[in-house]
Image (cartoon, grey):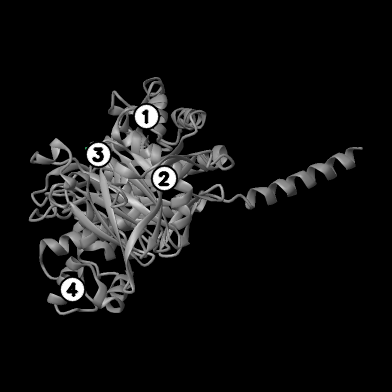
Amino acid sequence: MIRLYSLFSVLFLAISAVAQSSINLPHLQKQGSTSQLIVSGKPFLMLGGELGNSSASDMEYMKPIWPKLQQMHVNTVLAPIYWELLEPQEGKFDFTLVDELVKDARQHQIKLVLLWFGSWKNSMSCYVPAWVKTDTKRFPRVQTKAGKAVEILTPFGKNSLDADIKAFSALMRHIRETDERQQTVIMIQVENEIGMLPEARDHSALANTAFDQPVPKSLIQHLQTNKAALAPAVRSAWQTNGAKTSGNWEAVFGKSLSTDEIFIAWHLAQYANRVTEAGKGIYPIPMFVNAALNRPNVKPGDYPSGGPLPHIIDIWKVGAPTLDFLSPDFYNPDFNYWNDLYSRPDNPLFIPEIRFEPANAARVFYAIGHYDAMGFSPFSIESTDKPAEGPIAKSYHVLTQLSPTILAHQGKGVMNGMLFDKKMAIDTVHLGGYTFICKHDYTLGWSPKAKEDEWPTTGGLIIQTGPNDFTIAGSGIVITCLSDQPQTPNAGILQLDEGHYVDGKWKPGRRLNGDQDHQGRHIRIPVGDYGIQKLTLYRF
Ligand code: DGJ
């Protein structure tokens, strides 16, 4: 009997080991020209929101927030994990907050992207535990050129890196042990808005020693093999200085603030890479970093120098190869400009932070439709008093219904987006042999508000689902169509229905004709409406 029992337990252990290893962890997967986040074996579109910095430090405070998030149709919350609360005493980890966060997220059917507020948060080291903060010998600080210490851990502090790795590893081990099956935690952001302040580089003794070391071979090799495609600041510093293939940082890149930034970027990237590598060694789910964007004519150091920014992207790609992607945080204008720079074959777009404002309800359509974004996430998402009625809730409601269609068509060249305001009120989309002239709804001049100086930002997306079939969604858009075939240059509306999805099934609503499609002349979703329309065209 005992033998039989132990045979069964051996068998059971063997089976569960196999089951364990076959668990399909969240990961990125290529589809056409883009990458998708796969969760529990299926592509997942993150309709996200990032919590204000302190909200997730108190689960009582979070209680009324969860239902709000549900009313906003948020399916993913970006929530900080604070090193100081995770490891208040060295080596003694407290996972209470993490466990409660995961439990409450599950209860509300919401996924989590955890933000590791470790060594750096907005450049500063405010979230390191007291035992790190107070021991500046063991955990040395950045220094300015004038020798002033800053409340930032230097990336050259070996003990700091080891301590960060230990804490992050403990976190990832705990997530693996408690969440591998349910996969509530789907991605990790490593640190937060890494970058150097208030100068372009650290001037501590440790940093100065590193500055005199040769530029690493892997970076030099990258410069040589990617000469033509290097990011602007890297190319210009390297080539202006004679494209040297050896020497210390100033020998290779010249003496300038740009060199200081390249140097510190490399070491920040390496630090983040080591932390990421350790975490992935334990629980390999997608990991990324986010960037505080720079502004034109601002010196590095006045903005967080050396962060994961497009003008030095090579440094991050070579210095931190374990990261899955780099992401922009939007508190700047020029949404399209930055998204163009961050969307690359080696860098799928994810927007972890964007200032919470009504225009996001349009931007999210454009990010997903035009850039195949994996997700979108306004910052301080809980700060609204009207969760259900807010514009982002309305867009997320539409996008929740459309997610399966969007995910099926991403990366295949059959989807595009549009984004309008008064200055940029028209765009052209080519799909399936048709040209769509897309405009801001107010270009019709039908609304009295069209006369105002400012127009609300509006936007939408179009997906080609069949040779003559298109799904159009968004708000504040009007579209006319042409055929690209010279013999039949006109495109007419054969059928236009509004509707919505119930449990993944399309339920048509009104047949839109007459005044609603301007007697067959256009497709329109007025400002203030958020909808889905299915269109069939014909040529004549
Ligand atoms: C960007 C940071 O990443 C967030 O944590 C927060 O500090 C916001 N800025 C505040 O605007």
Residue pointed to by mark 3: 527
Task: Please state the horizontal and vertical placement of residue 390, each as a whole percent of the image.
Answer: 30, 30
Q: Residue at x 22, y 67 (%)?
A: 231
Provide the secondary structure element on which disc 3 rests.
Answer: loop
* Mark 2 crowdedness (10 Å alpha carbons): few <14, some 14-19, many ≥20: some
- The total of numbered circles placed on residues is 4
What amino acid does circle 3 point to?
Answer: Val
What distance separates the C-alpha of mark 1 from that of mark 2? 43 Å
Q: Nearer the viewer, mark 1 or mark 2?
A: 2
Depth order, front residue of 48/437: 437
Element on which disc 4 rests: helix
Q: Earlier in the sequence, mark 4 or mark 3?
A: 4
Q: CB of mark 4 within 8 Å of CB of mark 2?
A: no
Circle 2: residue type:
Asp
- Amino acid at the residue labelled 4: Trp
SS for dot 1: helix
**Quadrant location, the N terminus:** top right
The residue carrying mark 4 is 238
Q: Of circles 4 and 3, which is in front? A: 3
Residue type at mark 1?
Ala
Q: Quadrant of residue 220?
A: bottom left
Mark-to-mark CA distance, 4 and 3: 49 Å
For mark 1, what is the residue? 56
Of residues 252 and 78, the one nearer the viewer is 78
Within 10 Å of disc 3 (Cα), the crowding (few <14, some 14-19, many 20+) is many
Q: Which residue is mark 2?
A: 497
Asked if the residues shown at circle 4 and circle 1 are in contact, with their CB atoms under 8 angstroms apart, the answer is no
Tag 2 or tag 4, which sits nearer the N-term?
Answer: 4
Distance between mark 3 and mark 2 Cα atoms: 18 Å
At x 24% / y 79%, what residue is drawn?
245
Establish whether ligand 1 lies closer than 8 Å to the Cβ of label 3.
Answer: no
Q: Quadrant of residue 331?
A: top left
